[in-house]
Image (tube, rainbow, N blue to C red):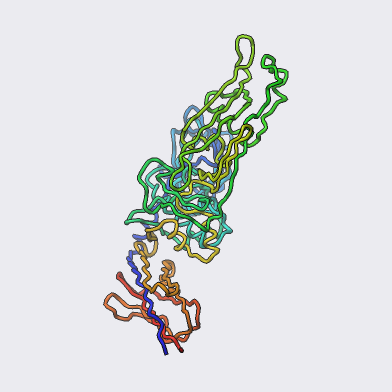
């Protein structure tokens, strides 16, 4: 008989028990303030409908269950109408649900929580104060498809919760500037991922991290300092290859000459102006929109040439940070004293790449990772990969990793290295698991994973041959507390065991696996 090498896993579990009323109070205070802009837009009139009673700050019922009211911005104030009757006028007002399960629909989109209604730049602007777990149920299915693998959804839920709590002290909005939030219409699969990871956040050195994420990193993660000039590089947002990312590809191909005016009479634009169009139908409309927002509002514009479009100054992750562009164009009513059209030119040289990307369209230039660019006398061609800034978690990378068998802990561990997953609130708040695997370099994979929801630790191990196995859990003094596996003859391959942690207190515990070979 010969013996396999002993394998050890040491992991730390810190469990804090809170009285139930303290936990409830902590959770009730875990809310987000979200300015509703994305779906509502800029409106001077909105309709609100309630599924339950809502009271105002004075305690009076403002809107009853099943009732609808119309809010209008009138002379910088909020006028409230029930039908055609005006019932009040306010600088701002707040409404709160009498029962927590009530929702308030704003122009047909339901939201939970409380609301402060204000007038902002002449438009009605609600601010939704919502319990963070309900907020996440309106975020995760809009940031990641709900039909993706459950482990990817859990990773996204934890990243979104972490990002939210990092920005909890400010009023965020419901757009891509923060996280897209769609209100109370969630999905059962993302709801489940949120519930299974309730209260979990990612921390580095005891602090909640900046859990940035994007759709695709193009095969290379990026440092925060290469994308945003402000702030120092964060150790948990490093540059490294990501072999699981789908490498979303994008391309821009533009004719330098968009309109040939060689046979057009610039003194008689009325003869040809309406019958002539630019060649490109994707980028040029966005460039014209940019011009109208930058000095040419309500002008009729024809872009004739785009002789320059380049990106430069690659950082260590391969992403560009600078760009240049030139546009030659005519404006219908800008003529000289003889009535001849005057050519206009806008040229930006070596400006931030984000400015150029904003001009050509973020959905066209999907990232700053430019793989190839070329320019000849007639065309400009730029090819790139990735979708988004590439910092932190890649959503497509998380999907592919989950489908390859990676857990949400594995996924978050890759995209946010040197971090821990901790329970910030809810049952088991304060618990933290650090996993350290000690094994010979030629030994097979061995992992420990804490399930906070069910208060247990799952231990997965692989055997390189058939063996007699015993798995023992010891306390810090070496005393055996449990034996999840005792003298079992197991086949070569992967096996798992569960250790229930409900009865243990704070401390350090060691799982010791002995595997005794059967022959040879």
In this view, the residue in front, 137 or 273, is 273
Q: Quadrant of residue 81?
A: top right
Q: In the rendered view, would you say 358 is above or below 184?
A: above
Residue occupying the far left of the picture: 477
Tell me what residue is drawn at x 69 percent, y 15 percent.
268
Tell me what residue is drawn at x 54 percent, y 47 percent.
387
Q: Quadrant of residue 70?
A: top right
Q: Position of residue 245 (x, y in %)?
A: 53, 55
Instruction: Give the tally of numbered discs.
Output: 0
Instruction: Work out whether residue 73 can be spotted.
Output: yes
Q: Position of residue 26 (x, y in %)?
A: 36, 56
Q: Position of residue 489 (x, y in %)?
A: 47, 86
Tell me what residue is drawn at x 37 percent, y 60 percent.
420
Instruction: Work out whether residue 42 can be spotted.
Output: no
In this view, the residue in front, 367 or 117, is 367
Residue occupying the far front of the picture: 376
Quadrant of the snapshot with the N terminus: bottom left
Q: Is residue 84 left or right of residue 473?
A: right
Q: Position of residue 14 (x, y in %)?
A: 33, 67
Q: In the rendered view, would you say 148 is above or below 309?
A: below
In this view, the residue in front, 20 or 494, is 494
In this view, the residue in front, 173 or 115, is 173
Q: Is residue 252 left or right of residue 520?
A: right
Q: In the rendered view, would you say 402 is above or below 319?
A: below
């Amino acid at each position: 008989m010969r013996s396999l090498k002993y394998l050890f896993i040491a992991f730390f579990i810190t469990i804090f028990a809170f009285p139930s009323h303290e936990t409830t109070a902590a959770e009730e205070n875990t809310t987000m303030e979200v300015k509703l802009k994305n779906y509502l837009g800029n409106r001077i009139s909105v309709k609100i409908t309630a599924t339950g009673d809502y009271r105002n700050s004075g305690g009076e019922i403002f809107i009853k269950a099943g009732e609808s009211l119309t809010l209008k911005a009138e002379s910088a104030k909020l006028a409230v109408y029930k039908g055609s009757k005006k019932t009040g006028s306010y600088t701002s007002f707040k409404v709160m649900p009498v029962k927590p399960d009530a929702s308030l629909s704003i122009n047909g989109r339901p939201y939970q929580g409380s609301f402060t209604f204000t007038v902002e730049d002449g438009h009605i602007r609600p601010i939704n104060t919502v319990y963070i777990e309900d907020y996440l149920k309106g975020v995760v299915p809009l940031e990641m498809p709900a039909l993706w693998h459950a482990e990817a959804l859990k990773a996204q839920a934890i990243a979104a919760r972490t990002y939210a709590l990092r920005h909890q002290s400010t009023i965020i909005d419901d757009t891509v500037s923060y996280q897209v939030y769609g209100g109370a219409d969630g999905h059962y699969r993302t709801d489940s991922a949120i519930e299974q990871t309730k209260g979990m956040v990612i921390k580095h050195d005891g602090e909640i991290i900046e859990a940035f994420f994007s759709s695709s990193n193009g095969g290379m993660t990026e440092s925060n300092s290469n994308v945003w000039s402000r702030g120092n590089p964060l150790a948990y947002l490093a540059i490294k290859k990501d072999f699981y990312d789908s490498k979303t590809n994008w391309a821009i191909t533009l004719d330098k000459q968009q309109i040939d005016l060689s046979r057009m009479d610039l003194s008689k634009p009325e003869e040809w102006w309406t019958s002539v169009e630019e060649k490109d139908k994707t980028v040029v409309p966005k460039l014209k929109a940019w011009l109208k927002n930058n000095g040419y509002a309500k002008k009729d514009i024809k872009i004739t040439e785009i002789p320059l479009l380049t990106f430069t100054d690659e950082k260590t992750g391969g992403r560009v940070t600078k760009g240049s562009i030139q546009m030659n164009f005519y404006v219908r009513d800008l003529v000289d004293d003889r009535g001849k059209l005057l050519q206009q030119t806008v040229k930006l040289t070596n400006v931030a790449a984000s400015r150029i990307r904003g001009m050509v369209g973020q959905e066209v230039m999907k990232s700053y990772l430019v793989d190839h660019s070329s320019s000849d006398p007639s065309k400009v061609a730029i090819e790139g990969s990735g979708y988004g800034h590439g910092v932190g978690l890649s959503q497509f990378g998380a999907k592919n990793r989950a489908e390859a068998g990676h857990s949400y802990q594995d996924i978050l561990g890759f995209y946010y290295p040197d971090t821990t997953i901790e329970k910030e609130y809810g049952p088991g708040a304060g618990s933290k698991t650090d996993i350290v695997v000690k094994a010979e370099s030629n030994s097979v994979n061995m992992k420990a994973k804490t399930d906070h929801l069910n208060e247990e630790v799952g231990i997965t191990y692989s055997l390189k041959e058939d063996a007699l196995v015993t798995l023992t859990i010891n306390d810090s003094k070496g005393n055996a507390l449990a034996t999840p596996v005792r003298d079992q003859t197991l086949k070569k391959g992967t096996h798992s065991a569960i250790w229930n942690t409900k009865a243990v207190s704070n401390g350090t515990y060691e799982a010791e696996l002995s595997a005794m070979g059967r022959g040879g």
